[in-house]
Image (cartoon, helix red, strand yellow):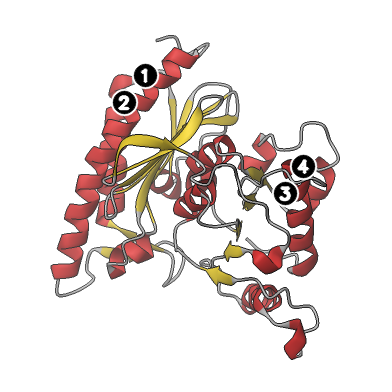
Amino acid sequence: MSSSELTPADLQSILTFTVKLARKAGELILEGSNAIQSASSESGVGEKKNSVDLVTEFDIKVEELVKKELKSQYPSFEFIGEESYAAGSCPPLTDKPTFCVDPIDGTTNFIHGFPFVCISLGLIYKRRPILGVIYNPFLDHLYTGITGQGSYLSSRLNTEPVRLPLSKPAKPLPSLGQALIAVEWGSDRSKTTINAKANSFSRLAGDPAQGLSEGKMAHSLRSVGSAALNFAMVAQGGLDLYWEIGCWPWDVCAGIVIAEEAGGIVSGSHATFATSSKEKGFGVVTEEILTGRKYIVVRAIGDTQGEKGIDAQKRIIQEFYATVEDVDAV
């Protein structure tokens, strides 16, 4: 396979390989979960930045497995992984095919035995995400996507992959008041960031008829604890919107492809959205968005008599950013 130009057939071949690899890594994740839950101490758990930014020996083991397998099969491809990045390997993006991997997304869930944990395998080509595999071995949910070829969910309940979104045609979304929104508290627990997020979450959930004048009375807020699975759930249609500040390209790379191919729209910070929403290329995830560490994704929204789906997605993002505080810290 030439690394200079990837064809749709090449991408299908890469997808087949990475799905097998994700399932293999999933077995190691389950093994690690059993070991941690039966251990008498947390000796295998370390801190990256603070007491809520955690890494386990299994994060490292899974990344080493994935990196070895990918390097053997695709020696000319670049590799960006969370644990190797944290260890000081920080290669810049190039036009070359680059695997972007989070070995265990949802490490805190993993440590606590909360079964929303996955491996996220993305492929960046010419500085844009083009392939994604997200696998949750606890629930046996496998999400896959290739740019221009759709995204799918496979599970023990479905013998054949089901094309996303699950709701066809996609449902309308009149306002944030009808939305189920995913948010995360993140690892930055400084006063400024926490207060900004808490105020934002209050506005999203609050009832304007009960004293919170800026409240949107969203159906509810969810914190799944995994950026990749939040993206996957938006692609599936189980979540209407996900907003995150402070995560990294390996957290979202695979999810971006899967969400986009399910009709979702991905954008970046408030300022990035404000600029790009007026451009013809709106909806294309550029390197600036991929590496910007601020992400918003809205599920596919069906056309109505008075509004196209893409316009509804823009409207929802505008309403969202008018509601939340613009958090600068990451």
- In this orientation, does residue 185 appear? no
Q: Secondary structure at mark 3?
A: helix
Front of the two marks 4 and 1: 4
**Residue to which mark 1 is pinned:** 13
**Label 1 CA crowd tier, 10 Å (few <14, some 14–19, many 20+):** few
Report which residue position mark 4 lands on. 308
Q: Residue at x 43, y 15 (%)?
A: 10
Distance Cα–Cα, label 2 vs label 1: 6 Å
Q: CA distance from mark 4 to mark 1?
A: 35 Å
Q: Nearer the viewer, residue 129 or 223?
A: 223
Q: Element type at marker 2?
A: helix
Q: State which mark lies toward you, 2 or 3.
A: 3
Q: Residue 152 in the image: state x and y as whole percent.
A: 43, 37
Of labels 2 and 3, earlier in sequence is 2
Classify 187 as above or below 295. Answer: below
Q: Are marks 2 and 4 in contact (CB under 8 Å)?
A: no
Q: Earlier in the sequence, mark 4 or mark 3?
A: 4
Q: Position of residue 218 (x, y in %)?
A: 65, 71
Sequence-wise, which precedes: disc 1 or disc 3? 1
Q: How far apart are the alpha carbons under marks 4 and 3?
A: 9 Å
Check disc 2 and report the residue beneath it.
Answer: 17
Label 2, label 3: how far apart the Cα atoms are: 34 Å
Q: What residue type is disc 1 on?
A: Ser
Disc 3 marks a residue whose amino acid type is: Gln
- Looking at the rendering, which quadrant does residue 328 occupy? bottom right
At x 75%, y 65%, the residue is 326
Q: CA distance from mark 1 to mark 3?
A: 33 Å
Residue 208 locus on image (x, y percent): 76, 82
Dots 1, 3 in contact, CB < 8 A: no
